[in-house]
Each structure stands twice: as C-alpha cells, then as structure tokens.
Image (cartoon, helix red, strand yellow):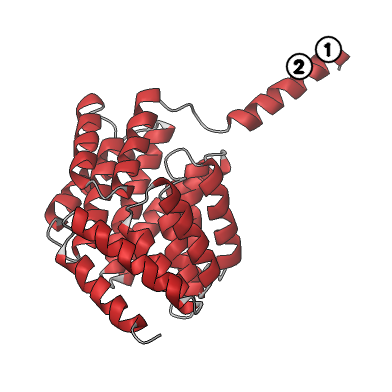
Amino acid sequence: MSIKLFKISIVLILLCFFIGSAAVDGSLKSSGQKCVSLVFDDNYEAAHREADALIKKFPKSPAGYFLKAAVYHHQMRDLGNTSFVTQFYVACDQGAKLGESSTAEWDRFFGAAVLGIRGAYERGQNRLVTSLKLGWRAIDVFRPLKNQGNVDALYGVAVYDYWVGANVKALFWMEDAKDERPRALNDLLKVSQSGIFTSQVVLYDLLEMYADEKKYAKIESVAKTILSKHGTNTVALEYLFFALYKQGKYDDAKASLATRKSVLEARNAPKARFQKLEADTKMVAGK
C-alpha cells in the first residue's frame, strides 16, 4: 500500500470513529432537548405542547411519542398518582410501533426508548417481570446501536444493566444476570457528558441509583448540578434534602426545606409534593 493510500485509510477510519452514529435532524434535536428542559422546570403543559408539535412535524417518527410518554411518566410521578396512565400507554404503543417498523437509526432508538420509559413506569408500579420483558425488547435494539457508537443507546443499556445488577439475587433464573453496577454507573457518567437527548435526563437516574447505593455525597453533587440550571426542580430539591440529612448537615437540610416550600407554593404544586415536604420537615425537626 502506498503512503498516500495508507493516509487516506487512516482518515476514513478516524471519520468512522468520530461520526459513530447517524446525524440527528437539527429541529428534532432542538425540540427534544427543549422538551426535556421543560420537564426539568416542572412545566409539563409546555413540554406536552413541544412533544405535540414534534408529532405534527414528524408524524412517522417515534420521537414525539417517546417525548409525550416521558412527559406523562414524570407528570404522574409529580402528582403521585396514575391519572394519565391511559394516555401514557397510547403514546408508548404508537411510538413502539413506529420504531419497530423503521430501519432508521434514530427511529429505532426512540422506539426502544419508548419501551424503556414504559419499563421504568412498570418498575415503579412493582411489576418487575413486566418491566424486564419490556427491557429485553429495548435492549435488543439498544445494544447494536451502542456498539455503533450511539451514546444515547448506551444510556438505555446502562440503565438496564444497573437495575438487573441491583436485583440480581431475585433474577437468579436469568442466565445472563450479572451485577455490573459500577460499570453501568461509569457508563451513565459518560452519557451525562456526551448524550444528545439523554445527557440531562440521566441525572434523574443517577440520583435514584446513588440513593440505592447510599452514596449521599454524590446525590448532593448531582442534585446541585441540576439546580444550577433548573433552580426550581422539585426532584432535585427533594434529593438534596435527603442527601444533606443523611450526611448530618442538618442546618443546610432545613434551609433546603425553606427553599423547597417557596418553590412548591409558587407553582401551586400537587398535594403529594407538599405531603413529602411535611414528612421531611418532621424528619429533621429537633436536629
């Protein structure tokens, strides 16, 4: 091989490495990121409008339906009930259908992501087997995409691997069940730096996982990262109090409660959020 051909080959290899996955439509990327940001601001009505606009613009893409389902998922967690479950399932079914019928990389990704968000909902309802079945379907799509360099697919794989690891004793009947939580957490940190659609939402997963691992200083750090951009984020404020309390930082914990109360009152938050505030206030009383 000549030196010139050798150099061309090296350039092509490097291009393949850096490109990794297919380019994302600019408007899809912008709308997706905006929708996630609105959820982090607890502005669910605006987030729904963004998802609806995306569905109208890309009716054959599962992306808008995934975002719609994700908004419903977080909205129900905020409310502390399942009042939007019918609409949630409709969005999931439509998104999964569109994803499975397409060969385009990002359509496949969002189709699998719909299965993932539905699996997360089922896990929250303590339906572990149903959650796992959805996870298996999603992971069959995510793993090949991850191997092609899609960082957002790495998010799906790492979340699945973490929760399999966390429940590995109960999943003894699964041949490939392994506890790879440290590796999964490292992968999720990579996603938080490089994900296109998942760099922000992965922070919610890290809060939950660090709580599962009792890594309170890391919970505090992630919560403060969220609050630096979304100062009224209720989830981050709740986890921040939890982390401060567990570390014995009682004065800081009480101060965070005062901030949280103001935030909840300003947005006329759901009753469930005030009940959690009351419970946390009683927890730190006398400390």
Q: Is residue 284 above or below residue 156?
A: below
Q: Residue at x 30, y 62 (%)?
A: 260
- Residue 257 tag number: none
Which quadrant of the figure has residue 205? bottom left
Front in this rendered view, residue 62 or 193: 193
Amino acid at pointer 1: Lys
Residue 7 lies, in percent from the top left, at 80, 18
Residue 87 lies, in percent from the top left, at 14, 50
Front in this rendered view, residue 112 or 210: 210
Amino acid at pointer 2: Ile
Q: Do the residues bearing badges 1 and 2 touch, measured as CB atoms within 8 Å? A: yes
Q: Which of the image's four quarters has the C terminus?
A: bottom left
Can residue 173 be seen here? The reply is no
Q: Is residue 42 above or below residue 178?
A: above
Q: Residues within 10 Å of mark 2 (few under 14, many from 20)?
A: few
Can residue 128 be seen here? The reply is yes
> Is residue 159 found left or right of 60 in the rendered image?
right
Q: Residue at x 14, y 55 (%)?
A: 84
Front in this rendered view, residue 286 or 3: 286
For label 1, the SS is helix
Q: Which residue is mark 1?
A: 4
Q: Which of the image's four quarters has the N terminus?
A: top right
Q: Which residue is mark 2?
A: 8
Residue 209 lies, in percent from the top left, at 47, 66
For label 2, the SS is helix
Q: CA distance from mark 1 to mark 2?
A: 6 Å
